[in-house]
Image (cartoon, rainbow, N blue to C red):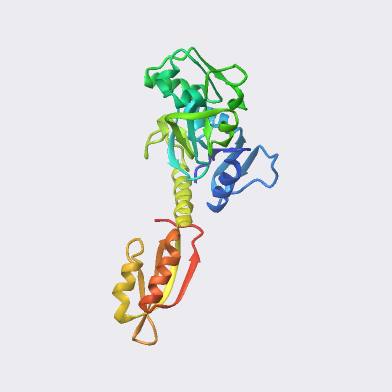
Amino acid sequence: MSTQPLRIAVPNKGSLSEPAAQLLREAGYATRREGRELVLADPENGAEFFFLRPRDIALYVGSGTLDVGITGRDLLLDSRAEAEEVMQLGFGASTFRFAGPAAQVSDGLDVTGLEGRRIATSYAGLVEDHLAAAGVSASAVVRLDGAVETAVQLGVADAIADVVETGSTLRSAGLAVFGEPILRSEAVVITRRDAGAEGGAHRPAGLEVLLRRIQGVLVARQYVMVDYDVPREHLDAACALTPGLESPTVAPLADPAWAAVRAMVPRAGTNKVMDDLYDLGARAILVTTIHACRL
């Protein structure tokens, strides 16, 4: 193991903080006992964790101060840091969209209608890049740290760009979304832009192990292990229902007319698979959780 620990940036607060900590915990890494810890050494796993504001993580990673980080795709792109996404994590999903006065939206307002207008957002870099790609020149992109939806009502902006979930907050402010989503975001693992390629000269030691462990947890969350006994005359049909990843494990039982089968199946379809197996004649159908795996 390298004497230089892998330096990992982790969100210290916000919606990404606890899911990121849980993911790392399931991947076998140490986690902080108190919320006020800023740095946590994990020498057993060759890692060192730095708990930072989610918005700052891409800057630290892009500058090379830290090796890898967990943050949102929206924060990564907004930072314009020299960092890139190397793995999607499947939590912290959000959709970033434009919104404007409901009456104007109903009259056909679209992104081209933002030409020469003021736009309020907490993600100025992301919005400016999106408008530039669309060939639209706003008169101003106003950066706000919060309560963006009130900017139009207060006369600070003509439209806003913000994370949209149900849209109820926007509607209460007299706004409506328009145009295609600017970005669909989620939590991601990031590294420096010149360190992303596997085997690259700047790829930090320990990164492959981290990514492999995280991938093992993400896969384990999507699957369960199913064990069951089935009459041999129905074995082929049962294996077709539970093909596993490469193939199911089949073992003989003391009764030669029966076989035991074990296979990974998608978690979302577990109960349907159990019903189909039972109808086929399988019995002693057991489902167990997979905590981690390597594929």
Which residue: 32% across, 81% down? Answer: 232
Which residue: 70% across, 39% down? Answer: 36
Which residue: 47% across, 51% down? Answer: 218
Q: Residue 119, relative to residue 205: is it above or below?
A: above
Query: Which percent across, then down, holds residue 188?
Result: 48, 39
Is 277 situated left or right of 63 in this image?
A: left
Q: Is any atom of residue 215 visible in this view?
A: yes
Which residue: 31% across, 78% down? Answer: 234
Q: Residue furthest bottom?
A: 255
Query: Which percent across, then down, holds residue 270?
Result: 44, 64
Q: Residue 14, relative to residue 269: is it above or below?
A: above
- In which quadrant of the rendered image does the C terminus lie? bottom left
Query: Which percent across, then down, holds residue 253?
Result: 39, 83
Q: Residue 217, relative to residue 230: is it above or below?
A: above
Query: Which percent across, then down, holds residue 201?
Result: 39, 34
Q: Residue 46, relative to residue 137: is it above or below?
A: below
Task: Give the mark count.
Answer: 0
Q: Is any atom of residue 61 visible in this view?
A: no
Is 147 situated left or right of 215 in this image?
A: right
Residue nearest the observer in this picture, 69 or 19: 19
